[in-house]
């Protein structure tokens, strides 16, 4: 039982560190490349205002003016999730037991 708790703690710590790495990979490497391909666009500032009062282009001011659909942030977080999931699927293969030779 004690070994399982230690294994779980190690897994949580490694998972948290891996999450930071993937977030940095998407935010600092992948999204700027996609932005350069699409003409220098920053997806984190893409939104659709749900009221006519929303006129600000900056993320800090737009929520104060009214409700918005921040679909650019959603796109970035979805890409984060996809990369996490792909790495988790690939990581599962490392823990599969080897077939017994016999």
Image (cartoon, rainbow, N blue to C red):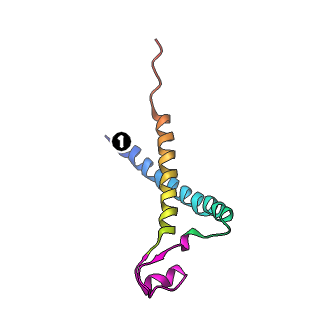
Q: Quadrant of residue 45?
A: bottom right
Q: Secondary structure at mark 1?
A: helix
Near-viewer residue (89 or 79)? 79
Quadrant containing the N terminus in the rendered view: top left
From the top left corner, tell me how far across and down residue 46 is, in percent: 53, 72
Q: Position of residue 71 (x, y in %)?
A: 48, 68
Q: Residue at x 68, y 64 (%)?
A: 36
Residue shown at 47% from the left, 75% from the top: 48
Q: Residue 37: percent from the left, percent from the top?
A: 68, 61
Q: Residue 61 in the image: state x and y as whole percent.
A: 49, 85
Residue 2, compared with residue 38, is above or below; it is above
Camera-side residue of 97 and 76: 76
The image quarter in which residue 96 lies: top left
Q: What segment is highlighted magenta in the picture? A: 44-68
Name the residue at 47% across, 48% down: 85
Does residue 45 sit above or below 28 in this rendering?
below
Judging depth in this view, the residue of 78 and 97 nearest the camera is 78
At 55% from the left edge and 82% from the top edge, which residue is drawn? 57
Q: Residue 101 magenta-drawn?
A: no
> From this viewpoint, which residue is outermost toward the front?
52
28 vs 46, nearest the viewer: 46
Which of the 4 image quarters holds residue 31? bottom right
Q: Is residue 71 above or below residue 49?
A: above
Residue 67 belongs to the span the image colors magenta: yes
Check disc 1: other Cα within 10 Å, few if <14, some if 14-19, many if 20+.
few
Q: Which residue is labeled 1 in the image?
A: 4
Give left or right: position of 17 versus 3: right
């Amino acid at each position: 039982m004690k070994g399982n708790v230690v294994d779980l703690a190690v897994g949580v710590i490694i998972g948290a560190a891996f999450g930071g790495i993937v977030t940095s990979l998407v935010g600092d490497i992948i999204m700027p490349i996609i932005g350069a391909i699409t003409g220098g666009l920053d997806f984190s500032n893409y939104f659709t205002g749900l009221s006519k009062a929303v006129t600000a282009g900056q993320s800090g001011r737009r929520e104060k003016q009214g409700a918005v659909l921040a679909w650019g942030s959603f796109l970035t977080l979805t890409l984060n999730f996809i990369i996490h999931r792909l790495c988790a699927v690939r990581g599962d293969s490392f823990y599969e037991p080897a077939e017994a030779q016999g």
